[in-house]
Image (cartoon, rainbow, N blue to C red):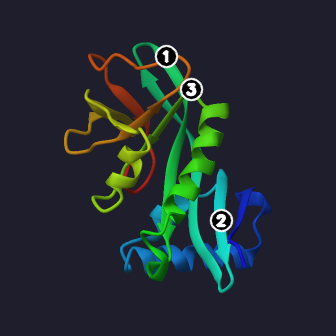
Amino acid sequence: MANRLRTAHTADLTPAELRAARTLLDDAFEGDFDDEDWDHGLGGIHVLVHDETGLAAHGSVVQRRVLHHGRSLRTGYVEAVAVRPDLQRRGLGGQVMAALERVIDRAYALGALSPTHEGEGLYTSRGWQLWPGRLSTLGPAGPAPLPDEEVLVRYGADGPLDPAHDLVFDWRDGDVL
């Protein structure tokens, strides 16, 4: 049986599909995927790849607002990308990313993600670029720098952004990026 790829909004996933995605993420991240991480991946478009035994891979893209040089950019932020441990390094992550990139390219001004060390190669091999400028967030107490964070970006039709100006991400609980 060939793998089946499904793209759906969070609202269109069944409780069983959401449980399967959360279980896959818990397994793939070896318990280092908490409730806030899960929450960050909800409310957008999910890509699910199934094989003959169940869910094999998952990823989602959610909308965030990023300020840059006086503009508020509608940004497709990639979250919760994982492949079942027994199937890693077989191209499923690339299938998930291709579907997520299609959504980003057609619906957002910018794509962004915060990679794990293990996953960074997947994204850079697909053309995602390390943001060379400063990062910050609009936190509850106002603007706050994020000097220890890094993001990879995928530029939209407007092309590269000026790294002399911060990317200012909207605030959220847990890890901001």
Give residue 171's quadrant in the image: top left
Q: Real-space Cα distance between discs 2 and 1?
A: 33 Å
Residue 56 at what x, y percent from top left? 58, 75
Q: Nearer the viewer, residue 141 or 63?
A: 63
The mark found on residue 109 in the picture is 3
- Circle 1 sits in a helix, a strand or a loop, which is it? strand
Find residue 11 and report its horizontal and vertical position in percent: 76, 59
User: Going 54% across and 52% down the picture, which residue do you hit?
Assistant: 97
- Image quadrant occupied by the N terminus: bottom right
Q: Earlier in the sequence, mark 1 or mark 3?
A: 1
Q: Position of residue 66 (x, y in %)?
A: 47, 30
The residue most toward the top is 70
Question: CB of mark 2 within 8 Å of CB of mark 1?
Answer: no
Q: Of circles 1 and 3, which is in front?
A: 3
Looking at the rendered structure, the kind of residue marked 3 is Ala
Q: Is residue 92 visible?
A: yes
Residue neighbourhood size for the residue with mark 3, other residues' Cα within 10 Å, grouped as few (<14), some (14–19), many (≥20)? some
The residue lying at 56 percent from left, 26 percent from top is 109
Where's residue 28, x and y in %? 43, 76
* Residue at the spot 58% in from the left edge and 49% down from the top edge: 98
Q: Amino acid at mark 1?
A: Arg
Vertical order, 154 against 100 (above or below): above
Name, please, the residue furthest toward the bottom: 53
Give the label, 3 or 2, closer to the camera: 2
Q: CA distance from mark 3 to mark 2?
A: 24 Å
Residue that protrudes farthest toward the left in the picture: 148
- Residue occupied by mark 2: 48
